[in-house]
Structure formats: structure tokens, C-alpha cells
């Protein structure tokens, strides 16, 4: 996509027009959830909430990979890092998430070999250069990042890199939407479906979910006009009483997604139950390596299985990830919990709702 093409979706005139249309057609109070952390950041950065009428409340969802990583998984990562002759490799934000007693950042300060990588392929390269060590890649993230992780597993197999393994804490979006709808307190009237995830899995991946709950769902892009267009379509559906599974991001999202990426995921992973921070166990919402790749399963190789552990005392990440609270409603927000000293992952990750509020929305108390 060219820069100019993207610019068109930032056009203030188009943004204003969409905002006016939403203001005209919105009459009843509704709660819309943006599922994806990238949407959350874009909404704050572009002041989208301020362009909406009072009838519309936007709430953030569980689409930030670091934020939904369960406390028990963080503890398992720390335990792995403490093992002899192990190099832990992972993406940046994860190392700052506090576990029950430590974090990867603290462990690294104490001399454990923990390396931040920009791509899983870097972890493969570390494994090739350190053949006397086990290199464990901590896999977090949704369907967006999973294809490259799956490709790395295939590459490790093909290139015979025996000291590389993957600890999969990956999660998938459609089962989380079901869990949200089954939680009565969330009271969500419509979903802005995650753009990047939808590029991979396609609109049809939500079909079953939509058929069951008949809740308006619109896939959205990340520029201001993309988001407003998705909101406009949702409001239209709600006001006319005609829920639909629709696409406001047709330049990137298709009905079937990316068949090659989906096939790579399917070849390497199978669905497994997973624990989500704030939501708890969700059936078939995680990804485990298939039997053919079981020897590369980091959990098995390290003999570590995450257990269910309570979230940090006082941290409202669970309610924030399910749209039941906004960050200012957390008693620790801006007091004990800041980006410099985060208590929970929602303040650590750049895509976390608490971090986004802290950074972009100083007057959020007025709207919460
Ligand atoms: S402000 Fe901090 S403690 Fe409160 S919910 Fe957010 S991350 Fe958790």
C-alpha cells in the first residue's frame, strides 16, 4: 500500500464527514468494543472518542497479546529463564510484565540469558550460534504473528536446529469473542473486529460466532477514517435492528483471509484450551504444536506447564480486558501503577489500554 493511499484514510474532511454521519444516525446508548490493541492506540492517538456522540461508549477488548498472557504463563517463563544452559528469546514488551515474584527483566538483571528479538528468525540464528545451549522462544500473540512462528518451526525442522524450541502461549480471537458474549456483565452491542488478525483468518472465521450471537461485527482498519467507517456501519446495523458480519477494511481483509498463512498455522499448530488473563480458561482458544513437532515443544522440553495463578492484588486488568472498566476505575492507576513502574501488563504493553490512557487521554476521568 502506498503512503498516499494510507493518507486518504487520514483525510480530515473524510473524518469529519463520517463523524457527522455517526452523530446524525446514533440515537440509542450503545457500547462498542474495539477488540484489538492497535485499534485502542489508534483511537486514542487520533482522538476518535471525542468525535463520537455521548450515545456511543467505546470500550477496549482483549486484543493486546502481552496483556492477555496469564500470570501463570509469566511465572513459567521466569522458571524457564532460571534453568541452566538456557537462552530465552522473546519480544520486547513481555520482559517487563511482572510475574508473581519476578519478571524476565529482573531475571536478566540477575544474569540470566534473556534476549529480546525483533523476529523469531533471530531466535533461530541465536540457536545456530549457541549449539551447547537450549534456545527457547516464548511465543505470544494472535493469528497475526502465528504464521511467522509456524514458519520458524518448519525452518528449524528443515535446517535441523535441534536446540531450538517454542513455548506456545499463543491465543486466537474468535473463541475470546464467544467468552465475552457469555459474560453477561460485558454488555457489548457491537464489535470492531481486529484488522490484522482478520487479514490472516478472513471474515468467514467469525461466521459461526456471528450466527450464534447475532451481534453486529465489522472488521476495521487502523486509520481514523477506517475506524469511523467501522463505527458508522455498526451504528447503522444497531439502529436499524439488522445485525451483520461486515467488512469496513476491504482493501486488506477478504472473506477467506490469507490461505497460505492459514495453511502454515494449520500444519504446525492445533487448537488447545488456554488461560487468558482476566477471562480465565477459554476452550480451544490457544495453539499447541502438533504431534509431528512435539519434540520442539518448549514446555515439554523444559518440563514446565503454566499453572493458574491469581493476578496482582488490586490490578483491574481482567475487567479492563473485558471492557467492564476503564483504567481510571482501577485504584492503582497513576498511583502505584505507571509505565515506569507497571503493576499489570495493561500498563506495560504499548498496546495496553492502561498505557494508552496514560499516554493519550489525560482527561479520561471525565469520560469514564
Ligand atoms: S492501572 Fe495498572 S494495576 Fe490498574 S488495571 Fe491497569 S495495569 Fe492493572
Image (cartoon, rainbow, N blue to C red):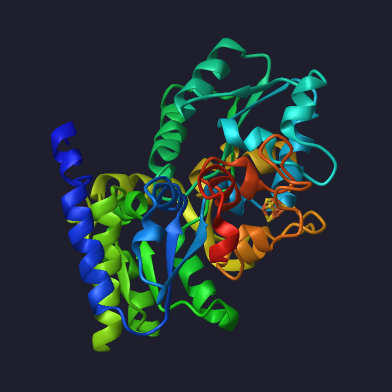
Between 355 and 160, the one lying in front of the other is 355
Q: Is residue 352 left or right of residue 101?
A: left
Residue 200 appears at what percent x and percent y? 31, 50
Question: Could you tell me which quadrant the C terminus lies in?
Answer: bottom right
Q: Quadrant of residue 206?
A: bottom left
Residue 83 appears at what percent x and percent y? 79, 28
Q: Is residue 312 above or below residue 111?
A: below
Q: Residue at x 63, y 58 (%)?
A: 327
Between 258 and 241, the one lying in front of the other is 241
Q: Residue at x 82, y 57 (%)?
A: 313
Q: Is residue 215 above or below residue 12?
A: below
Q: Residue at x 17, y 54 (%)?
A: 14
Residue that extends furthest to the top in the rendered view of this protein: 129
- Inspect this view and state whether residue 163 appears: yes
Residue 360 appears at what percent x and percent y? 50, 45
Residue 6 appears at what percent x and percent y? 20, 40
Q: Is residue 18 left or right of residue 72?
A: left
Question: Could you tell me which quadrant the N terminus lies in?
Answer: top left
Q: Residue at x 19, y 39 (%)?
A: 7
Q: How many numbered discs? A: 0
Between 288 and 43, the one lying in front of the other is 43
Q: Quadrant of residue 74?
A: top right
Between 361 and 287, the one lying in front of the other is 361
Residue that extends furthest to the bottom in the rendered view of this protein: 241
- Inspect this view and state whether residue 304 appears: no
Amino acid at each position: 500500500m502506498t503512503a498516499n493511499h494510507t493518507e486518504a484514510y487520514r483525510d480530515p474532511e473524510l473524518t469529519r464527514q463520517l463523524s457527522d454521519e455517526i452523530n446524525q444516525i446514533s440515537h440509542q446508548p450503545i457500547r462498542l468494543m474495539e477488540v484489538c490493541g492497535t485499534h485502542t492506540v489508534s483511537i486514542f492517538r487520533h482522538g476518535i472518542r471525542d468525535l463520537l456522540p455521548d450515545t456511543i461508549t467505546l470500550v477496549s477488548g482483549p486484543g493486546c497479546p502481552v496483556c492477555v498472557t496469564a500470570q501463570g504463563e509469566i511465572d513459567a517463563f521466569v522458571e524457564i529463564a532460571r534453568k541452566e544452559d538456557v537462552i530465552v528469546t522473546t519480544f520486547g514488551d513481555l520482559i517487563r510484565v511482572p510475574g508473581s515474584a519476578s519478571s524476565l527483566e529482573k531475571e536478566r538483571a540477575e544474569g540470566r540469558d534473556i534476549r529480546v528479538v525483533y523476529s523469531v528468525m533471530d531466535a533461530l540464528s541465536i540457536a545456530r550460534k549457541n549449539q551447547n545451549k537450549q534456545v527457547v522462544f516464548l511465543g505470544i500473540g494472535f493469528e497475526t504473528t502465528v504464521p511467522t512462528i509456524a514458519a520458524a518451526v518448519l525452518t528449524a525442522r528443515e535446517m535441523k536446529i535441534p536446540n531450538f524450541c517454542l513455548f506456545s502461549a499463543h491465543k486466537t480471537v474468535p473463541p475470546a469473542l464467544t467468552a465475552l458474549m457469555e459474560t453477561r456483565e460485558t454488555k457489548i452491542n457491537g464489535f470492531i473486529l481486529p484488522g490484522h488478525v482478520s487479514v490472516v483468518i478472513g471474515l468467514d472465521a467469525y461466521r459461526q460466532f456471528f450466527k450464534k450471537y447475532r451481534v453486529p461485527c465489522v472488521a476495521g482498519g487502523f486509520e481514523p477514517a477506517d475506524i469511523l467507517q467501522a463505527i458508522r456501519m455498526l451504528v447503522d446495523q444497531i439502529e436499524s435492528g439488522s445485525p451483520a458480519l461486515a467488512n469496513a477494511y476491504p482493501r486488506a481483509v477478504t472473506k477467506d483471509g490469507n490461505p497460505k498463512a492459514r495453511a502454515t498455522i494449520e500444519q504446525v499448530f492445533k487448537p488447545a484450551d488456554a488461560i487468558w488473563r482476566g477471562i480465565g480458561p477459554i476452550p480451544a482458544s490457544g495453539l499447541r504444536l502438533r504431534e509431528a513437532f512435539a519434540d520442539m515443544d518448549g514446555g515439554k522440553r523444559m518440563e514446565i506447564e503454566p499453572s493458574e495463578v491469581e493476578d496482582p492484588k488490586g490490578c483491574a486488568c481482567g475487567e479492563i480486558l473485558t471492557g467492564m472498566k476503564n483504567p481510571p476505575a482501577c485504584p492503582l492507576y497513576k498511583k502505584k501503577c505507571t509505565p515506569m513502574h507497571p503493576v499489570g501488563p495493561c500498563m506495560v504493553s504499548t498496546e495496553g489500554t492502561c498505557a494508552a490512557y496514560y499516554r493519550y487521554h489525560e482527561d479520561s476521568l471525565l469520560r469514564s
